[in-house]
Amino acid sequence: MDPVHILGIESSCDETAAAVVRSGEELISNVVASQIATHQQYGGVVPELASREHLRAIVPVVRQALADAGKTYQSIDALAVTQGPGLAGALLVGISYAKALAFALERPLIAVNHLEGHIHAVLLEQRQKGNRELRFPVMALVVSGGHTHLYLAEQRRESWSYENIGHTRDDAAGEAFDKVAKLLGFGYPGGPVIDRLSKHGDPKAVKFATPQIKHPDRKDSAHSSQTFKSGAPAPAKKDAHKRESWGSGHPRPDAEHPRFDFSYSGIKTAVLRYVETNNLAPSIEFRRTALAQVSKPKLEDYLANSDKQTLDLVASFQRAMVGDLVAKTLAAAREYAVATLFVTGGVAANNELRQTFEQEAAREGLPVYFPSRPLSTDNAAMIAAAAYPKFLAKDFAAMDFSAEAGMALK
Ligand code: KG4
Ligand code: ZN
């Protein structure tokens, strides 16, 4: 089959992105215009400003992605755009533009779920590296500013199916990183700063009590007598082979299995209590003011404005977050007897998270894959890659489709 060049467009949150991907396996160009500078002063993404910035950036970003790929508009085989989940106004900018282009160029348009995109970021790069050994099913942790979701992903011929087996009950993991960083005067977004600062603190200094981070796993089946402690490894099901199989002999997600939910609003409150109890407010205010005067603060600037107690708090917070994400994901992987782990989304860029996943998964003999850091956070290459199987299946969007802010992945 001839190579298929898909132009991907992503505008679900605060990044305007366009990319060209060949046949779901080769990244040809990848352009991301970040709006961080616009939202930084508000300490988080302001939806109206995001839409306005997408409107400004979308045309030059797409043009740049085509130029970098050495492609003309006419030489693109199909377009792909994020339909949801995300901010409705932001999504509509990408969707409207993609529809107009598809109409004018007479090319098919493919609507992609943003979360499926994060999963395909891993697949794209593994294919690009020539890895044809991936085994299924996959347990994918999508962990970002808006999501902390566990999916069982299975490939049947060209098409993919997903089962959500757990998600956050309140804050997403990235949201907790961002809120804690904001609370401590480190600005927005918080994940990358906490990541770098954590190496300079003692992760054992502050203890977070279990209920502050653990969420009991849900059993959908009311008649079931088994309960699992969150974070603790779920016992392997001895009778798994008797169950209806999902994919190649793996237990099927159903009411018999616990769900692996997350909860991160408690730890954020625990950090706030720590700040109050230890009277850290004056030093936080001092840091906030000092960092506001630096246009692009570097690690040295953050360190120069942080005492040991704050660094210890940051390192302990990250350790607790990483510990919960890894333990819960591995427990889910055992429960569903998966062959492979994917960890993707903005928080997957975190160094301690990657290292801990690598160590713990190796202990269980489970291969774990991450996207490269540029493809961990929002981008359009993942959207173009996720669109390829849909292109092969001729799963094209009708021209009247709209944004779906709360779109679920199935
Ligand atoms: O996937 P993404 O770009 O956007 C969403 O779909 O939400 O993820 C952004 C999130 C932010 O919360 C940001 O703080 C977090 O990912 N993040 C990190 C790191 N880099 C980005 N969190 C922890 N460590 C990092 N290195
Ligand atoms: Zn995302």
Image: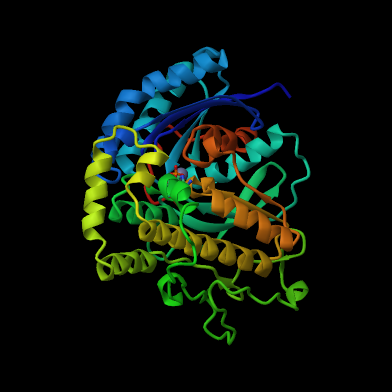
Q: Where is residue 373 in the image (x, y as percent from the top left)?
A: 55, 39
Q: Position of residue 199 (x, y in %)?
A: 50, 52
Kindly indicate the quadrant of the structure image that contains residue 53: top left
Tell me the residue at 28%/68% (across/down).
Answer: 278
* Of 106 and 129, the residue lying toward us: 129
The coloring applied to the image is rainbow
Location of residue 345 with respect to 357 vertically, above or below: above
Left of 367 or right of it: where is 260?
left
Spot occupied by residue 306 in the image (x, y as percentages of width and height): 34, 51
Residue at (28% x, 50% y) in the render: 185
Q: In this view, does 301 lie above or below 360?
A: above
Q: In which quarter of the image is the N terminus?
A: top right
Side of 92 where 104 appears, left or right: right
Which residue is more in the foreground, 161 or 322?
A: 322
- Residue at 43% in and 40% down: 83
Q: Where is residue 86 in the image (x, y as percent from the top left)?
A: 38, 45
* Residue depicted at 72% across the width and 73% down the height: 243
> Viewer-proximal residue, 269 or 200?
200
Position of residue 59 in the picture relative to residue 223 (left or right): left
